[in-house]
Structures are given as structure tokens and as C-alpha cells.
Image (cartoon, rainbow, N blue to C red):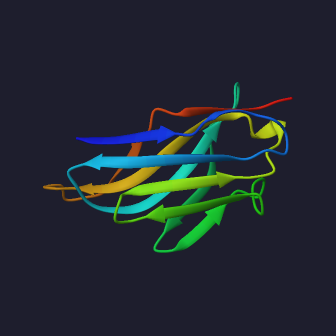
Amino acid sequence: QVQLVESGGGLVQPGGSLTLSCAASGSIVYINIMGWYRQAQGKQRELVATITAGVTTYADSVKGRFSISRDNAKNTVTLQANSLKPEDTAVYYCNARILLAGASRYNDYWGQGTQVTVSS
């Protein structure tokens, strides 16, 4: 019913930049919150950034380095990651809270994840 497809991960040197994109498709009536989470090996999944109604939130560890934006017309969310550090290495997941056609409530959906590796 809903697909979240991420792109843009890869290998980057410390100090470099990456742009992650996520596109939602399906019988979507409205998307409330969109965001990015990440999970490093051996660690729990953690919030990176979210955006809703133009309001953004960021994890303290990425403030000033990452920027989240959204295109409501295209149901996409983008994460611009700058000044990357080795500790940013993780699988990054797109998340969206979506109201589907015929549904009475919002549900959370996840992308398949994209690997970001920061290493020299």
C-alpha cells in the first residue's frame, strides 16, 4: 500500500557531504511527520531529524551539520548531511506518519534503509 524508497547513501571521507532522499508512494491522503533515523552496528535506532508543518527537530549530535527538508507536493524528504564524522556511520532509515485512503488513523511507515559509511 505504501512504499518509502531511500537513495543517496554511500562511502564518504570525514568532512564530506551526502544527500539522502526518500520518496513515499501509494494511496496517500496526507503525510504528517517525515523524518530520518539511523542505526549503527550494535546500537539502537536513534532519531536524526524530523520535519512537520515546517518545524524541524534535530538530534544534538547532528545540529549545525545536517539539514532536513520536505517537498509536500512530491511526498519526499531530503537530508543534507555535511561535515560528516566517522560516528555518523550507520544505516539511515526514512520514516513517515501517513494517512492512507480509507483509513481512519495515521500509521508509521519505514524505508528499507541506506548505508552511510564515513571513513578515510
x 61%, y 36%: residue: 9
Q: Residue furthest top?
A: 42
x 51%, y 48%: residue: 21
Q: Which quadrant is the N terminus positioned in?
A: top left
| Relative to 108, 38 lies left or right | right
Q: Position of residue 119 (x, y in %)?
A: 82, 30
x 55%, y 73%: residue: 55
Q: Position of residue 11 (x, y in %)?
A: 71, 30
State which quadrant residue 67 falls in. bottom right
| Relative to 34, 56 lies left or right | right
Q: Which quadrant is the C terminus positioned in?
A: top right
| Label total for image | 0
Q: Position of residue 38 (x, y in %)?
A: 62, 40
Q: Is 79 situated above or below 38?
A: below
Return the residue nearer the eye: 68 or 95: 68
| Relative to 26, 64 lies left or right | right
Q: Residue furthest left?
A: 102
Q: Position of residue 18 (x, y in %)?
A: 67, 45
x 59%, y 53%: residue: 79
State which quadrant residue 105 falls in. bottom left
